[in-house]
Amino acid sequence: MPSQSRQETSANGSTTTTTTTTTTATQADVENSTQAVSNYTVVSGDSLWNIAQNLLGNGGRYMEIYEANRDTMNSPGAVRVGQVLLIPGAAAVSAPSSSVTDDVLSEVEAGSQEQEEALAQETGTRVEELPPDENLVEYRSGSTATGGIELAQGTWLDVTTAHLSGGEAQAWETIAKNHGMSEDLLIPFNQHIESVAEGSAEEVGAAVTPALVAGVRIYIPSAAEILLAQCRKRAKTMSEAVAKFKELSGSYNLGMMEQARQRASGEVGLGYGTSGVDGVFYTQNPEIAGASSRRTSELNGETEYRVNWGVDFWKCSVFLNDVAFSAGYKPDMTENDHYRLAGQLHWSKQWEEVNVSQAAPGCGWQRFGGTGSNESHNAILSSFVEVEDVSEDMEQWTFSIVGAESDRAAESERVHQIKKGTNENSSGKNIRFFKPKYER
């Protein structure tokens, strides 16, 4: 078997060079070393997942390594070449050979049993990773392709005649909106529907739009499943996508995204429509002006305070700060217990601006162009931002947001032509991204 020389430092500080063969830790190795501690130097291609898999015999134990090194790591995905990690319970376990390429390791994490058996027979060969399955079934909770990470499960919805009352095409849009997502996200997760095999002229990306009839079961993906799928589309390998997902799920991003989709769902989401429901919206924040314990409802298993500010208020700002509150962060409230107006997020003490290159799902978003309700807008960024050059002086930013739209809180795509080196779009409005600063 291929071998590798690697420096490792024991708990007493002594350094040794160890030659290891391509192997995975046995259960006995792990059990015999659970009380031991060693140091490990990160090499190219490492992630906490594969380090835990190779040194602890279980990639799912990556959080044990993260917790032991939180003083030097900002997130589980923030490992760097040359970094020395404290590995609890790993002194007797050897590391893998670097001759097993990153692509091979990612195939073990992401592939089927047949792929793993083939890998075992051809350990020294380079295995090209397959492109992501367009059905997105591989990103569902419980799939072996997720690298063993645990994802919140989605839900199933039985289509009824009521869903189809506006026509089949409208049904996809309505169902998606009612669950805080766009149909472009919902349809790819539903390629299991039998009518897909029959083909369809209408497509969403690479996915066929299935025909809907009463009784068909639709899968509503969780925010975590959608986020992993988005990470995979941006990554070269599944292991890279999993590492990015772990980084985002270990920070504010996934929690904010979960709450954005939740608060845009059902009756709660309907209240944030800029046309309003007689000026009524729901909030989980009992401190906000107008919230009263005498006017509460149980929606989605949570207590919601019914608030009526009239029809002319900044519902996009309310949605943004309600998401932050429900995700466990301090919303930006003014002296009169209202939320800060849309377009003023850059003045907030509860939000911190981030560069477009660091913007990711779960960030706050601001379009600021003036003081009128049509000039400024707030929302939650629900995708990564694609930046493309369009000319010598301009670039294009393409992304999706979840925010208060015309009839409810919903997801929509945004495309902005931006002057290079600025946040200013071609209409003279500023586009900014933010992260919540303080936990409640």
Image (cartoon, helix red, strand yellow):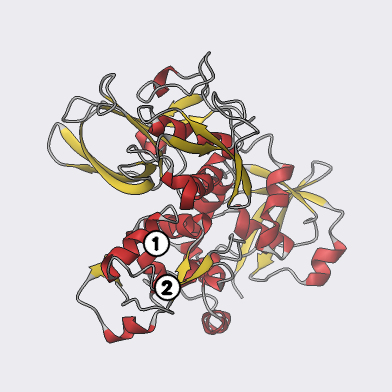
Location of residue 335 with respect to 128 vertically, above or below = above
Q: Which residue is mark 2?
A: 160
Q: Dividing the image into 4 quarters, which one contains the C terminus?
A: top right
Give the quarter of the image for residue 284.
top right
Q: Is residue 54 visible?
A: yes
**Residue visible at 56% across and 48% down?**
249
Earlier-in-chain disc, 1 versus 2 = 2
Location of residue 412 with respect to 186 vertically, above or below = above
x and y percentages locating residue 93 in the rendered image: 76, 62
Give the quarter of the image for residue 409.
top left
**Residue visible at 87% across and 54% down?**
35
- The reply, left or right, for residue 313 in relation to residue 292 is left
Which one is in front, 296 or 177? Answer: 296
Which one is in front, 265 or 281? Answer: 281
Q: Which residue is mark 1?
A: 175
x and y percentages locating residue 168 in the rendered image: 29, 71
- Considering every residue shown, the one lying at the far left of the view is 391
